[in-house]
Amino acid sequence: MRIGFDARLINQSGVGRYIRNLLAGLLKFDHGNRYFIFTRTKDLQRINKLPGKNFEKIAVDLKWHSLKEQVLMPRILSSYGLDLVHFPYFNVPVFYRGKFIVTIHDLIVDHVETGRASTLPYPLYKIKRLFYRRTVKSAVKRASAIIAISQNTKNEIVSHYHVDPQKITVTYDGLDSNIKRPEKFSSLYPFDYLLNVGNAYPHKNLETLIEVFRDKAISSRLKLVLVGDDRFFYPRLKRLVAQKSLEYSVIFFGIADDRQLVNLYHNARALITPSYMEGFGLPNLEAVSLGCLPVISDIPVFREIWGDDLIMFDPREVNDLKRAILEFLALSESDKLQMLKKADKRATKFSWQKTVKQTLLLYNRV
């Protein structure tokens, strides 16, 4: 088959990791299909590093979520005579009439309606949200098949868009090959810290996490290190930290490369993930693989992935988050080791090799 793959988001966090790992696996293991990889000019060098020779790369400098994308992308894709296109994100051009598969990572925007969840001013964020919902609805209705990255995401697609469950395949995220447990090396910081990895969108609930550090029972023992792209939403958090005089307790690291990320996980006392909702929660998996226990919010997708093997808390209750952190700090080393063994056993179920095989089966089926 001639398979198109929209890789314009390859250098982004989150979806970008999914694209990078899935493409690398597809090109390594699939020698029967020909791949046409569409990406931005500035990302072509990254495509060149992918394994295998059964692919062509095509420069497409169309910004996602743009009118040009909607109008021009269908023409570009149609000109290559593709048997199938994989869109690894919901932004499928509504006018594309070829056969395609779409990956839906989450439906968070369906839950978060306020302007706090957008970088745009009112009323533009309302227009953007309406566009989002119509694009997702069009994508899931027209797709030959849908990939959801968790059973929870699948359930939400069925509930929100009334899609036949048989049309949706669950393929979980895996662990990035660059995230490997190192020989012990020096910490980037000379103090004990809790770690949070990801963006600062409102559903990440970082305001509640910051509030916890007003409690001396916690801030006297630990600092908080926040890792993520500080261009979006972080300015609001920095103002909050300043207002509460927590500059000494809360550290904004910014973007970390893979080596720095491994170091930060490896030397953290724990990873804290206080999200209200997630599609999968890859940082939790990364943390466990590096010997760092996550303390996580009690939400359906985390129950799906981790059962009751980790310390959980109600993300809407700051006192329950405090309780969870103090409970973790009170654990003996033996208790932590037992908890980590259980979590590590669960983590081994998730691999990109398994995801690649499931995706290939889906390609051939449709």
Image: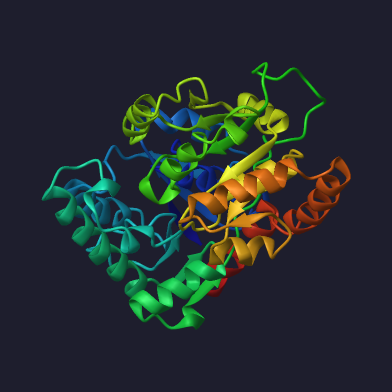
Q: Residue 320 at x, y = what percent?
A: 56, 54
Residue that appears at 66% across and 52% down: 352
* Residue 317 seen from this side: yes
Q: Is residue 366 left or right of residue 119?
A: right
Q: Is residue 75 above or below residue 231?
A: below
Name the one closer to the observer, 3 or 135: 135
Which residue corresponds to the image point at 70% horizontal and 64% vertical from the top-left?
A: 308
In the rendered view, tell whether residue 125 sits above or below residue 8.
Answer: below
**Residue 239 percent location from the top left of the image:** 32, 28
Name which quarter of the figure residue 289 lies in: top right
Q: Residue furthest front?
A: 216
Number of numbered discs overlaid on the protein picture: 0
Q: Residue at x 18, y 46 (%)?
A: 68
Please determine whether, in this image, residue 116 is positioned above or below residue 184.
below
Residue 217 or residue 260, whichever sits in front: 217
The residue nearer to you, when weighing 242 against 51, is 242
Q: Is residue 22 visible?
A: no
Q: Judge from the rendering whether residue 293 lies leftward or rightward of residue 167; answer left or right.
A: right
Relative to 345, 274 lies left or right: left
Q: Nearer the viewer, residue 219 or 310?
A: 219
Outermost residue, left side: 123
In the image, is 318 to the left or to the right of 304? left
9 up-or-down from 168: above or below: above
Residue drawn at the location 46% of the way across and 69% of the way down: 146
Coordinates of residue 195 in the picture (x, y in percent): 59, 35
Residue 124 in percent (x, y) is at 13, 48
